[in-house]
Amino acid sequence: MKTEIMSVDNFLTRDLSYTQAVDLLSAGETVAFPTETVYGLGAIATSENAVSKIFEAKGRPQDNPLIVHIGSKEELSTFTQNVPNLANICMDAFWPGPLTLVLPIKTDSLAKNVTAGLNTVGVRMPDHPVALELLRRLKQPVAAPSANKSGKPSPTKAAHVYHDLNGKIPLILDGGATGIGLESTVLDFTTEVPTILRPGGVTKEMLEKVIGPVNESKLTDEAEAPRAPGMKYAHYSPDAPVYLIEASISTVQQAIEQIHKDEKKVALIATEQFTFTKADYYFSLGQEHQLEDAAHLLYEALRNCDETDAHIILVPIFVKQGVGTAIMNRLEKAANGNWFES
């Protein structure tokens, strides 16, 4: 299969790009497109055969549910039921935006491989002009996880998608670099108190200002299917092992010296306060305390490490507050329990 990249920034080819994407999706194929979080790999959510092509292209576990993307709130009534009032309040406050709501699903309304057999579905309306234009032209719900090889850092540029999925999907809509850079917050409304299953750009603090108390879930190792993407499996991992470390310049420098004594090379992903450490490779996450910048740069930094010959990747930790909670959620899964200790 030949993978084509089509820009939607070119006025002359813009309409052709959307038309081709809609035609492919309608024919049961997959299309990658940008959202405000990361690039997604989409297929019509009502077609089990189309959705199966997402799992095949990504190498994604079948019990990992997919998020459904819509272009208008009216589409919800075709596949959800008994939507709580608090969920409607969240839609009014945060849609379009990086917030996925887990809601009860109507029987036989979506392909079973979208929900991993659960009686719930995660749904969101992306805040990106390309995604919204595509969805509103299509007028059908689209299942779309991140458009990357499963387990690898999510793509924030069309080039990242092409690197991972070239030859496995027919089309990538190139809308430039994504804005937020981390996947959406997932909020479960089937629990007594709404529960964050995955932190993201819409923070716990932001939600509680709008709907009151919100709980936070933990990753699960349970045998049943996870209720949202990112709850069960290791994610966001570059080729070299990632180690988390205390965010202290002296601690990081000592770690680098120890790694060098073992005749190994180290890549450091950190804010600019760590610029002057003696890492073999350094990838900036922006200025200290600018968490939105760090979130935006994180996945590209992890991907850049694969272009080096580093044996170890060190990442100083962030405070789990606001967007820092989402950053640490991704880093803890990338590290898969690894902490660097002298």
Image: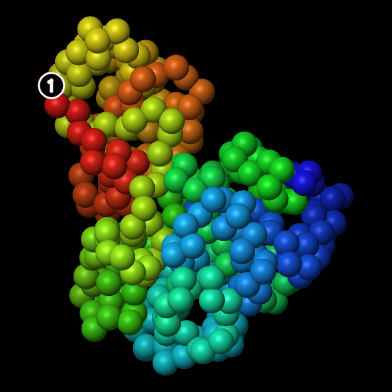
Residue 142 vs 298, above or below: the answer is below
Q: Secondary structure at mark 1?
A: loop
Q: Tell me how the rendering is colored.
A: rainbow
Going by the numbered disc 1, the residue's amino acid type is Ser
Q: Residue at x 34, y 79 (%)?
A: 189
Residue 282 vs 50, above or below: the answer is above
Q: Residue at x 20, y 75 (%)?
A: 213
Compared across the picture, whether 213 is left or right of 308 comes to left
Label 1 Cα crowd, 10 Å radius (few <14 / some 14-19 / many 20+): few
Task: Indicate the position of residue 144 as horizontal and vertical percent values.
Answer: 57, 62
Residue 93 vs 310, above or below: the answer is below
Q: How many marks?
A: 1
Relative to the observer, which residue lies in front, 86 or 334?
Answer: 334
Relative to the observer, which residue lies in front, 205 or 69?
Answer: 69
Q: Is residue 4 visible?
A: no
* Quadrant occupied by the C terminus: top left
Quarter assignment of residue 195: bottom left
For disc 1, the marked residue is 342
Q: Is residue 63 visible?
A: yes
Compared across the picture, whether 129 is left or right of 118 comes to right
Relative to the observer, which residue lies in front, 79 or 58?
Answer: 58
Q: Residue furthest front?
A: 223
Quarter assignment of residue 289: top left
Q: Residue at x 71, y 43 (%)?
A: 167
Q: Residue furthest bottom?
A: 82
Compared across the picture, whether 3 is left or right of 316 comes to right
Task: Indicate the position of residue 298 as horizontal and vertical percent values.
Answer: 41, 38
Q: Residue at x 81, y 59 (%)?
A: 20
Residue 279 vs 159, above or below: the answer is above
Task: Indicate the position of residue 2 as horizontal and vertical percent values.
Answer: 78, 44
